[in-house]
Amino acid sequence: MERGLLWLPLLVLFIGLAWAGWNEFQKVESYRRWAQPFRYSKYDIYSVLALDEDSLVVGKPSRQGPIELEQVRFKQIRSVQLQLDGQTVASPSQALDDPKQSPKSIAIQLDLGENQLQIPFTQLDLAIDWTQRIQQELGQA
């Protein structure tokens, strides 16, 4: 009886991990279906991002597909900036050169004139790549 009670927490942990894996798999599969018509797309645990011919689509991943989608036309975007821990980086490519760089928050900030749009990332190199890609689409590179 005591041995069974000792194994119970491990069983609960295993079921929790299996559910978390299934949940993330469902998010990735719904993202994959959503992203097919776009030229470029990105999946992150914080956000989904896709480039179309003349616009950028940003949202949050969910099992049913991306939610809270916001479409921004390139002509609405005034500037694109990489932010690390809330501070704007002058040159995105220089952010990788600093070996001490381990930011807690990574985001791309789009200046839309009257408001700002923050796109969160988990990986610095992916954020730099997308900052440069958006700047290239805008002709700012």
Image (cartoon, rainbow, N blue to C red):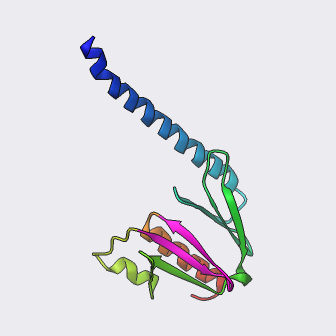
Depth check: give the residue in front, 74 or 17.
17
Q: Is 100 included in the stretch rendered in magenta?
A: no
Image coordinates of residue 19 in percent, x first then y, are 49, 35
Describe residue 48's horizontal placement relative to residue 98 as left or right: right
| Residue 121 x %, y % | 49, 66
Give the residue at x 59% y 47%.
Answer: 27
- Disc tally is 0
Kindly indicate the quadrant of the structure image that contains residue 7: top left
Report the quarter where the C terminus lies. bottom right
Q: Residue at x 51, y 55 (%)?
A: 45
Left or right of 35, for residue 25:
left
On screen, residue 53 versus residue 40, left or right, reads right
Residue 110: x and y in percent read 60, 79
Residue at the (72%, 69%) spot, across then down = 71
Q: In which quarter of the image is residue 39?
A: bottom right
Answer above or below: position of 13 versus 57.
Answer: above
- Residue 99 position, x and y percent, is 28, 76
In the displayed structure, 91 sits above or below 129; it is: below
Q: Nearer the viewer, residue 79 or 2?
A: 2
Q: Give the range drawn in magenta.
A: 105-121
Asked if the stretch drawn in magenta spans residue 112, the answer is yes
Q: Magenta span: helix, strand or loop, mainly?
A: strand
Residue extending farthest to the top is: 1
Residue sitting at the far left: 2
Compared with 21, 11 (above or below) is above
In what quadrant of the picture does the N terminus appear? Answer: top left
82 to the left or right of 72: left
Residue at the image point whose x is 44% and y is 70% from the top = 125
